[in-house]
Image (cartoon, rainbow, N blue to C red):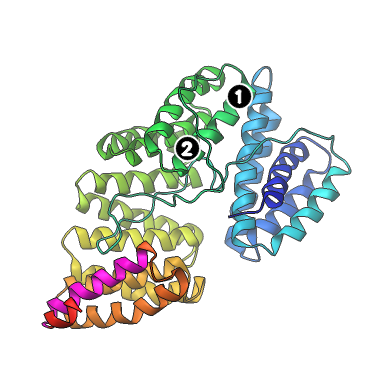
């Protein structure tokens, strides 16, 4: 969870991106933000540069009554990205603070907007499905930095309200009230379509959020259908390999699986993986997430041995890229153990869960839900391996 000072910095820095985009110091801002967000990785730096270019293009082309809305929406989006950066790389705070001070010397003072407590809009891909101990509901990261409860909120009428309502709706969902988030985004979509038009990128982002939270609220089939309808529009408006288009493909694949068609989800993730590997490389974070999902849906489509092999190949990559105790690395280990058992080797699954358990205990604590889930899996596969007495103990 980010400290309030770090959230305030992310808010300020997001507004500075927008201010600099229409000013004389854009080159300095673009280099500085791309360097910070890239963290020395060429692919991530290019992705940041692409998003910065899109921001400048949107702002330079904006006119009339849409300008205020677009500025605020873009500032919120950048604040969310920068909050993510500070959460993952706390050491980046000093460099970001220095960059903001440098740019503020030549930009007008502004009133900051509040960033999403965590994540960004559109919402990140939902968490990978799990065949093992974690719930196979498709829920993404539900952690948030604040609890914002809105009861019976009306659709906003002013542009300034729209950006804040988007932030609030996202926060509500992060606080595990998916149905309320769904209803908020349904109201926001009508406002965005009226203010920006049905094919504006921010309108498409609102459609993506609405579809996502419909799925998180339990209606996977409707979420699947909405992402299926949104995808060709995003491909035409944003491009077939735009990051938001690929996120929509990711969500379409997951909700296709949650709606009951694991084989189709597997095939969609296989196609998405080829794009992400070609465009971003084998070690890019989104590529690794896609590999994880592909392996999960491969298993759920009946290919337990193939899922086992895919997780066996993914685990050492995760350890190298993210570290041995990173949640994504441990999730890959857990899935490897589970699908090893499903593929017929209960004793090996037992041993793998036994090796994972002390790490979960050390990292998360004895009573954390994911630690207890590993305990359950260990007992289950111990019994399946023929030692029911040990499983009971």
Identify which residue is drawn at 43% across, 63% down.
Answer: 288
Instruction: Name the side, left or right, on which 19 lies relative to 390.
Output: right
Residue 256 position by quadrant:
top left
Instruction: Name the side, left or right, on which 36 lies relative to 330.
Output: right
Q: Position of residue 298 (x, y in %)?
A: 24, 61
Density class for disc 2 (Cα within 10 Å; few <14, some 14-19, many ≥20) is many
- Per the rendered image, the range of residues in magenta is 370-386
**162, 389: nearer the viewer:** 389
Q: Position of residue 183 (x, y in %)?
A: 41, 27
Is residue 377 shown in magenta? Answer: yes
Residue 228 position by quadrant:
top left
- Residue 246 lies, with reference to residue 303, above or below; the image says above
Is residue 42 shown in magenta? Answer: no
Report the number of numbered marks.
2
C-alpha separation, residue under disc 2 versus residue under disc 1: 16 Å
Tag shown at residue 161: 1
């Amino acid at each position: 969870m980010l400290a309030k000072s770090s959230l305030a910095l992310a808010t300020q820095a997001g507004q500075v991106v927008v201010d600099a985009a229409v000013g004389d110091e854009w080159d300095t801002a673009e280099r500085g933000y791309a360097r910070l967000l890239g963290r020395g990785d060429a692919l991530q730096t290019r992705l940041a540069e692409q998003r910065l270019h899109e921001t400048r293009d949107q702002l330079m082309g904006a006119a009339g009554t849409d300008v205020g809305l677009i500025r605020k929406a873009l500032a919120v989006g950048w604040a969310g990205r920068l909050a993510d950066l500070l959460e993952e790389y706390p050491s980046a705070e000093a460099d970001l603070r220095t960059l903001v001070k440098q740019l503020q010397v030549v930009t007008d003072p502004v009133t900051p907007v509040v960033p999403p407590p965590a994540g960004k809009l559109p919402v990140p891909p939902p968490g990978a499905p799990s065949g093992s101990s974690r719930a196979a509901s498709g829920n993404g990261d539900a952690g948030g930095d604040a609890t914002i409860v809105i009861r019976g909120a009306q659709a906003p009428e002013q542009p300034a309200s729209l950006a804040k309502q988007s932030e609030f709706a996202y926060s509500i969902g992060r606080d595990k009230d998916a149905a309320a988030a769904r209803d908020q985004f349904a109201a926001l979509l009508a406002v965005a379509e009226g203010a920006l038009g049905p094919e504006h990128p921010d309108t498409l982002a609102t459609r993506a959020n609405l579809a996502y939270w419909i799925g998180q609220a339990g209606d996977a089939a409707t979420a699947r259908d909405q992402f299926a309808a949104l995808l060709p529009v995003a491909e035409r408006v944003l491009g077939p390999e735009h990051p938001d288009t690929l996120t929509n493909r990711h969500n379409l694949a997951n909700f296709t699986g949650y709606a009951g068609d694991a084989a189709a989800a597997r095939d969609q993730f296989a196609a998405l993986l080829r794009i992400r590997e070609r465009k971003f490389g084998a070690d890019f974070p989104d590529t690794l997430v896609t590999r994880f999902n592909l392996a999960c849906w491969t298993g759920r489509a009946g290919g337990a041995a193939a899922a086992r092999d895919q997780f066996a190949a993914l685990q050492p990559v995760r350890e190298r890229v993210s570290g041995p105790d990173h949640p994504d690395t441990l999730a890959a280990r857990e899935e490897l153990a589970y699908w090893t058992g499903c593929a017929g080797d209960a004793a090996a699954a037992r041993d793998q869960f036994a090796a994972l358990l002390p790490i979960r205990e050390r990292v998360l604590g004895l009573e954390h839900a994911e630690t207890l889930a590993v305990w359950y899996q260990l007992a289950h596969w111990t019994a399946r391996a023929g030692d029911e007495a040990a499983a009971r103990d």
